[in-house]
Every structure is written in structure tokens, then in C-alpha cells.
Image (spheres, rainbow, N blue to C red):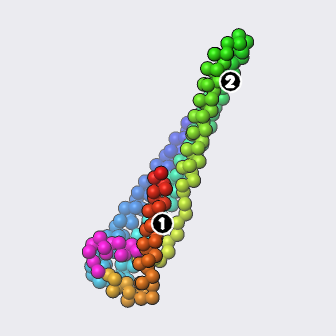
């Protein structure tokens, strides 16, 4: 079991390293967006934005896999703990038999409290595992993310690209502003819910 736990932890670390690498590559692509916008080249900026979003999703995928492997690791760890817990319950049962034979109610109560605490500890571990596995979600890469990323980089750099984007896709330019503010509100609510 120890070898299995080691392999699972090692795999989790590898996945986390790959996620970090993809995140660094995403940042490189974002800096290329800025350069392309400064050179008034919106087509290149769009390509770099697509690459950046692809790297972002790659990073998230690696993190999602790392979380799943970590979840499996936690289950294996729980199984090892259950083995030890089973032994402890056997000892508690023997002690309970002795206490009942002498009918010392205080002893019986103490042993039952110990048993209850062990059961609660196991329940907390199981609940933590279920909560961590439930937070993984799937993501897609719609085109509005590409344009939102371009706009974010332009805003951070103090560049004006509104006219360039309108030239590329004038029918969606007015709709995009309302959708982005709604999206930011949704993301803020989801982030707050995760923190709680």
C-alpha cells in the first residue's frame, strides 16, 4: 500500500508541474498578444489569444487530473486507515466485553465515547474527500473568451483596440460588453462560493 500511495503522490506532482508549465506558456502567449496589439496586428493578436486560452485549458485539465489522482490517493489512504481502525474497533469491542462483564457503566460510557469519536473522524475524512472531488468542472473555449483576453491585455497595457475589434466583427461588438459584465458577475459568485 505504501508503494501505491507513493506512486499516486508522484503522479499528482507530475501533473501539477505540467499544469504550471502550461500556465507559463499561457503567460508567454499573452505577452505576444500585447506586442501584436502594439504593432496594430489584430489577426496575430487573435491567434496568440487562441493559443493562450488553449494553454489555460491545458493547465486546468492537468490540475483536474491531479485532483482526481489526489482523490484516489486519499481513498487509498482512507483504506489503510480503515484497516487500522478495524483493529482498534476490535480492541474496543474486547474492552467493551470486559466492561460489560463487570457492569461498570462509567467504563462502558468511556469506551462508547471513544468508539463514537473514531467513527466521526472517519466520517470527516470521507466527507472531505467527497467535497474535493465534487469541485472539478469542465470548461469549453468559446470565441468570446479569445476577444475578452485580447481586451484584458489591451486594457492592462493601455492600448486602444476597440476599433480594431469592431473592424473584425462589428455585429457582436455591442453585445459583448453586456455579456462580459454578466460573465464577470457569475465568475465572482462562483469564486465566492468556492471560498466559503
Q: Is residue 123 above or below residue 112?
A: below
Q: Is residue 179 above or below residue 113?
A: below
Magenta residue check for 150: yes
Residue under circle 2? 90
Image position of 118 (left or right of 178): right
Q: Residues within 10 Å of mark 2 (few under 14, many from 20)?
A: few
Foreground residue, 49 or 128? 128
Magenta residue check for 87: no
Q: Provide residue 114's location: percent of width, then percent of height.
A: 60, 25
Mark 2, secondary structure of its residue? helix
The quadrant holding residue 164 is bottom left
The reply to whether residue 73 is visible in this rendering is no
Q: Residues within 10 Å of mark 1 (few under 14, many from 20)?
A: few
Q: Provide residue 146's location: percent of width, then percent of height.
A: 43, 75
Q: Provide residue 192's location: percent of width, then percent of height.
A: 45, 57
- Identify the residue shown where x is 69% and y is 21%: 93
Residue lying farthest to the top in this orientation: 102
- Identify the residue shown where x is 40% and y is 59%: 21
Foreground residue, 92 or 43? 92
Residue under circle 1? 186
Foreground residue, 83 or 8? 83
Residues in magenta, as a range: 148-160
- Disc assigned to residue 147: none
Cα–Cα span, label 1 and label 2: 51 Å
- Identify the residue shown where x is 26% and y is 74%: 158
Amino acid at each position: 500500500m505504501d508503494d501505491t500511495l507513493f506512486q499516486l503522490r508522484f503522479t499528482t506532482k507530475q501533473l501539477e508541474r505540467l499544469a504550471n508549465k502550461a500556465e507559463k506558456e499561457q503567460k508567454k502567449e499573452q505577452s505576444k498578444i500585447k506586442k501584436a496589439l502594439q504593432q496594430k496586428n489584430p489577426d496575430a493578436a487573435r491567434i496568440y489569444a487562441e493559443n493562450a486560452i488553449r494553454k489555460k485549458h491545458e493547465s486546468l485539465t492537468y490540475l483536474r487530473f491531479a485532483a482526481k489522482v489526489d482523490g484516489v490517493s486519499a481513498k487509498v489512504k482512507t483504506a489503510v486507515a480503515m484497516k487500522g481502525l478495524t483493529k482498534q474497533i476490535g480492541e474496543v469491542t474486547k474492552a467493551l466485553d470486559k466492561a460489560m462483564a463487570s457492569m461498570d457503566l462509567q467504563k462502558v460510557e468511556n469506551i462508547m465515547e471513544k468508539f463514537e469519536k473514531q467513527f466521526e473522524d472517519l466520517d470527516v475524512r470521507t466527507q472531505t474527500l467527497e467535497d474535493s472531488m465534487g469541485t472539478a468542472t469542465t470548461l469549453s473555449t468559446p470565441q468570446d473568451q479569445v476577444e475578452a483576453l485580447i481586451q484584458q491585455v489591451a486594457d492592462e497595457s493601455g492600448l486602444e483596440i476597440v476599433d480594431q475589434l469592431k473592424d473584425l466583427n462589428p455585429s457582436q461588438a455591442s453585445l459583448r460588453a453586456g455579456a462580459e459584465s454578466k460573465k464577470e458577475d457569475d465568475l465572482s459568485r462562483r469564486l465566492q462560493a468556492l471560498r466559503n
